[in-house]
């Protein structure tokens, strides 16, 4: 399994909120515990909200709130993107300002985020270019609300064009995923939005059908 796919599977497994031991995750994904430890370090460094440590287990934490403001997901998305863009700017003064601002935000994040190593707004490794997917967010959100089918083009996917029913968007600290019923392969599929090259809205609407709903997908997580 490619590492990016394995990281996404880890996010999906942790999304139930329960504590997962590294040995159980390793057995389920067919890798070593050492690989799970390295993958967890990568996810945490990339800003995915995970609590836990080696020997105890890992779990996804609750949504992030920055007191005294309660931020919506689009607002937090915009903040991440703005800091990431400014952090890559050529102006050293602006780069410094972006990093000190990120440190101030990091200082007031909820205390249940046990790892403080990843500076807010600057992703690493596999998620460093997650901002590329932001351009698709309005289309995907609208399709979920309207219950409209989409055609996704994913150049790195063995199936480069898929017809899907978008069911839910999830945010994992700089990483957005969309849960879909994939009509091309007749199964549920989780896509990283930043890896989608193109999104086309199709004229067909969809309705709930047994075995193809978000509730059915959530049942598979148990």
Image (spheres, rainbow, N blue to C red):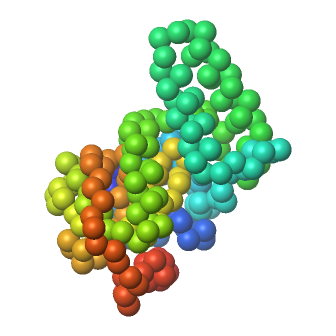
Percent of width and height locating residue 175: 47, 48
Image spot of residue 137 (x, y percent): 44, 50
172 relative to 136 in the view: left or right: right
Q: What is the quadrant of residue 128 in the picture? A: top left
Residue 177 position within the rendered picture, expressed as x and y whole percent measured from the top left: 43, 57
Q: At 53% from the left edge and 66% from the top edge, which residue is drawn?
A: 15
Question: Is residue 204 found left or right of 75 in the rendered image?
Answer: left
Asked if residue 48 lies left or right of residue 6, the reply is right
Number of marks in the image? Answer: 0
Q: Can residue 8 be seen here?
A: no
Residue at screen point 42% across, 81% down: 213
* Residue 130, placed above or below residue 93: below
Q: Which residue lies furthest to the front in this view?
A: 203
Q: Residue furthest right?
A: 68
Residue occupying image coordinates x 44% and y 43%: 134
Q: In which quarter of the image is the N terminus?
A: bottom left
Q: Nearer the viewer, residue 176 or 139?
A: 139
Residue 104, given in percent of the width and then of the height, sits at: 74, 30
Name the residue rendered at 24%, 78% in the picture: 186
Position above or below: 165 against 130: below
Q: In this view, does 191 lie above or below 102?
A: below
| 204 and 48: which is toward the camera | 204
* Whether residue 124 can be seen here: yes
Q: In this view, does 47 lie above or below 191?
A: above
């Amino acid at each position: 399994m490619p590492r990016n796919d394995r990281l996404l599977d880890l996010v999906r497994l942790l999304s139930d909120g329960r504590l997962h031991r590294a040995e159980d995750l390793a057995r389920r994904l067919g890798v070593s515990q050492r690989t799970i430890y390295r993958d967890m370090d990568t996810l945490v460094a990339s800003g995915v909200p995970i609590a836990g440590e080696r020997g105890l287990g890992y779990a996804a934490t609750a949504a992030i709130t920055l007191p005294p403001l309660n931020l919506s997901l689009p607002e937090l998305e915009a903040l991440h993107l703005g800091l990431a863009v400014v952090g890559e700017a050529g102006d050293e003064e602006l780069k410094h300002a972006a990093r000190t601002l990120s440190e101030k935000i990091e200082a007031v994040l909820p205390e249940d985020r046990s790892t403080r190593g990843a500076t807010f707004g600057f992703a690493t490794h596999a998620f460093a270019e997650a901002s590329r997917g932001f351009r698709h967010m309005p289309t995907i959100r609208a399709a979920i609300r309207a219950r409209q089918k989409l055609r996704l083009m994913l150049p790195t996917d063995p199936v480069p064009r898929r017809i899907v029913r978008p069911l839910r968007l999830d945010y994992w600290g700089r990483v957005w995923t969309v849960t879909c019923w994939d009509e091309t392969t007749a199964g549920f599929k989780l896509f990283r939005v930043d890896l989608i090259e193109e999104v086309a809205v199709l004229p067909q609407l969809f309705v709930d059908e047994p075995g193809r709903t978000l509730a059915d997908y959530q049942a598979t997580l148990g």
